[in-house]
Image: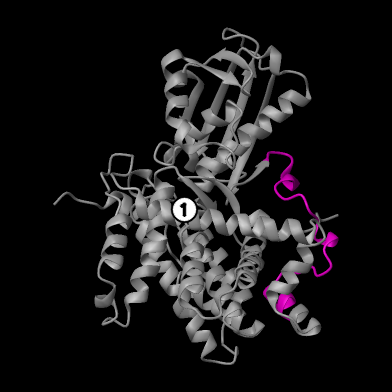
Amino acid sequence: MAAEHPYVGVFDLFKIGIGPSSSHSVGPMRAAEMFLAELEGKGRTDAVGRVEVDLYGSLALTGIGHATDIAVLMGLQGEVPDQIDPASVAAKLAMIRQQNELRLAGKRTISFLEKEDLRFHRKTFLEGHPNALRFRVFATREASEPLAEATYYSIGGGFVIQEGCEGQAIQHPISAVPFPFNSAAELLKLAEQNGCGISQIAWENERAFRTEAEIRDGLQKIWETMQACVERGCRNEGILPGGLNVRRRAPSLFQTLTGRPEANMRDPLNILDWVDLYAIAVNEENAAGGRVVTAPTNGAAGIIPAVLCYFDRFCPESTPEKIQQFLLTAAAIGALYKKNASISGAEVGCQGEVGVACSMAAGALTEVRGGNPHQVEEAAEIGMEHNLGLTCDPIKGLVQVPCIERNAMGAVKAINACRLALRGDGSHFVSLDRVIRVMKRTGADMSSRYKETSRGGLAVNISEC
């Protein structure tokens, strides 16, 4: 009997965590949390004297640049992405490396020799997913037989599954919601039958799991976290970590835009500069390991906040209720990609990150600006159609170049997709379902060099001037 499709909701796709990567840092930290919980459940935590971690595939190839090593260490110490203080990470990491020990689950101090106990297998890809990691624990450093072991796959957007337990990534079955859908066609049919927008379908489905107050509070927290990230990005100056010596641009851009506001009135495209600013601010914070909202990934975390800030600050339709409708609509669109294709750069390239975020933002903006469900679907399709084939080729494995600017371009593209859709009646040639299928096939055909391995594209074709 085939497994039932899961329901992918707004709080599955929008998670609060830290940078620089949802698949390479948030996911591995979650995997460590899951492994520790399994150890605790079996009563084995107190017996552990050594832990070994093996990273495979993309997690190994770009793990240093994506802070996978740091995320694993923090996770083994009991930290979780939505609660860890980003400012505390450097000191905790230094303590582990200076003392050659860590506090397992924040309770038990054990020996930890990073060069021996955290291993990068850059030439080995496991069958389950390009992002794989394995934990093993032993009673003593000399012991050869593990007390326990488990393999996990970080499948994009902070979602994690354990090998052999593939149904664990998302807990809610789709049969639990009043309006189940697994395709854009089904979503449009539900909207037509019920005479409502896509956000209302998503709202009613969320009510199957939470009270209305919990949904509103959760959405408000997501929006507040996005706004705070934009504000920090506009304020924090300096050089981004990792060795590329990329200077943060958002603070100077913010000063330029606010310093002479009367001059900005002469340029009809000045609003796009603000959209660029919002996206760059978020992704510079992400690159620095700051707190961001996975939307639907960290590498694409700036697009939805940028488009939401544009809507909130430049569009007369903006209200707190509309902000929440935006997030609900975006989540419904993102769920289609999550279920029918991928949001993992290691699996399908950056079309699964920036492309999906652009599609989500385009459709959501169309709904809150008064578009009907068919126009929403068209905008979402346009947002992906013109990101098809987008590679994931971060230089030096860092979520900086081209990732930061790519978010700014994705945000502007989402706004234009919305405007194109609103100028029509929603009828168009290529359906959203079809473009999602094409995106998945394109990702399957794409060489692994262009899928978050830093072995192709810009990552290996940069010459010094």
Badge 1 element = helix
Which residue in the rendered view is the most extreme toward the left?
A: 465
Q: Position of residue 328 (x, y in %)?
A: 66, 67
* Figure coloring: one colour
Of 437 and 213, the residue lying toward us: 213
Q: Residue at x 76, y 62 (%)?
A: 206
Q: Position of residue 170 (x, y in %)?
A: 72, 50
Q: Is residue 230 visible?
A: yes
Within 10 Å of disc 1 (Cα), the crowding (few <14, some 14-19, many 20+) is: many
Quarter of the rendering containing residue 234: bottom left
Q: Amino acid at mark 1?
A: Cys
**Residue at x 68%, y 56% (from the top left corner):** 217
- Asked whether residue 348 is in view, the answer is no
250 to the left or right of 340: left
Which residue is pictured at 64% across the width and 64% down the height? Answer: 331
Q: Viewed as shown, does residue 269 lie left or right of 318?
A: left
Numbered range of the magenta stretch: 162-188
- x then y, percent, for residue 423: 51, 91
Closer-to-camera residue (133/353): 353
Task: Identify the residue under disc 1.
Answer: 229
Taking the magenta stretch, the answer to whether it contains residue 153 is no
Q: Is residue 360 above or below residue 150?
A: below
